Image (spheres, grey):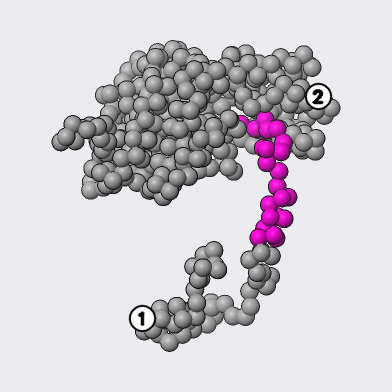
Amino acid sequence: MSEHRYLPLTEQDQQEMLETIGVSSVEELFSDVPEEVAFSGALNVPPSLKETALMKHMQELSDKNVNVKQYPSFLGAGVYEHYIPSVVNHMLLRSEFFTAYTPYQPEISQGELQGIFEFQTMICELTGMDIANSSMYDGPTALTEAAMMSCGQTKKKQILVSACVHPEAVEVLKTNAAGQGLDVVVIPEKEGVTDIDALSEAYSEHTSCVIVQYPNFFGQIEDLEAVEAVAHQDKAHFIVSSNPLSLGVLQPPGAFGADVVTGDAQPFGIPTQLGGPHCGYFAVTKKLMRKVPGRLVGETKDENGIRGYVLTLQAREQHIRREKATSNICSNQALNALAASIAMSAIGKYGLEEMAEQNIRKAHYLKQRLQDAGFAIYGSSPSFNEFVIDLPKPAQEVNKELFDKGIIGGLDLGRFFKGRESQMLTAVTELRTKEELDAFVEALEGVK
């Protein structure tokens, strides 16, 4: 058995299982399947390979891919390539963390619980909120859970969401809202930010919450003070989806009176890895503490006065009174939350601020270089690490030409917005060098 890198199924194993369930063969096991639907003959697949030949074949296929380690990437739109301290994987892949699913037995899960507790604490510090849960699946589902919680709390059915929120997050929101008979109203954008006048007109006594993104999908900074004034003119909730890295330099949503702040912790220690898995964060004010979906980890002391960690304030309705539940998502992304905790701890408070500042400075440098080269930038509001470029031809074509020059371009906005096929959402992180930024401008000049 030791020669195998896995546990094989031997003929003896198969025969013992068949005897245990009382059949003599595999054919007898599936005899209830009608002949007209049962497959007969040989599958149209290549013959099996020996392990070494198979590994070589798979490596050859893998080598045909291009990744962000080979080509500089200017693609963001919710998934970003950031610096990940090497200590993240060293700790994350320890078996006691890597194999732990969920801490149902807190007395033997103290390490994992402490990691989650630190994650909650750091999210609260970044967002300026009172309480954060132990994480959610990703940013879009966390945002949707916030809206569902708001509707349940206010007993109102109208959700106002800015068109400057990530379009995929808006689709997730609409899908969940449809099942609960809720009305999602998308507020138009004006020059890359939420149209405050349109928001005021749409607001009514039926509004449960107002949702904006900060920085928004187009990379621009929303006027949270103006949005909050509209959101709180009656009893609606003010919900902000935010890139947590940007909060290293931007005023946190909690300072503007946000009731709920959600987002994706992917910028901290979680690779781009084909778009997932991620780790959603969910932070609230104290008055909403008992309505938070998922679970919270609390710090306490045992009978000997020694510090310990426990699951606390987990809504039992999620298990035994489901029709009254805030949410039926009872799990979390503990491993990715731990990755974010390790990354934030390693980078540190001042390192995080410096990292965020580098994103702003490098994005501003590229924006200025592009404007000097004759490219127009959409929108006039300040931005964090993303901005929209107006192109002389479709972004899809431009991206193909950039790729041929060894560059991964930005997001083709035509993918989500009709009539915006010649606009590219471009992301610049701290990992992009001056040489790469200059090469991007030179490459774009060549595709005019």
| Residue 247 within the segment the image draws in magenta | no
Residue in the picture at 54% in, 67% down: 4
Identify which residue, 164 or 240, lies in the foreground: 240
- Determine contact: label 2, label 1, CB under 8 Å: no
Among numbered discs 2 and 1, the one appearing first in the sequence: 1
What residue would you read off at disc 2? 442
Which stretch did the figure color magenta? 55-78
> Against 112, is 216 above or below?
above
Report crowding for label 1: few under 14, some 14 to 19, many 20 or more residues within 10 A (C-alpha). few
Disc 1 marks which amino acid? Thr
Residue in the picture at 24% in, 32% down: 307
Marks 2 and 1, how far apart at CA: 70 Å
Residue 405 seen in render: yes
Q: Which mark is residue 20?
A: 1
| Residue 73 within the segment the image draws in magenta | yes
At which x and y percent is residue 359? 60, 21
Residue in the picture at 55% in, 18% down: 354
> Against 128, is 3 above or below?
below
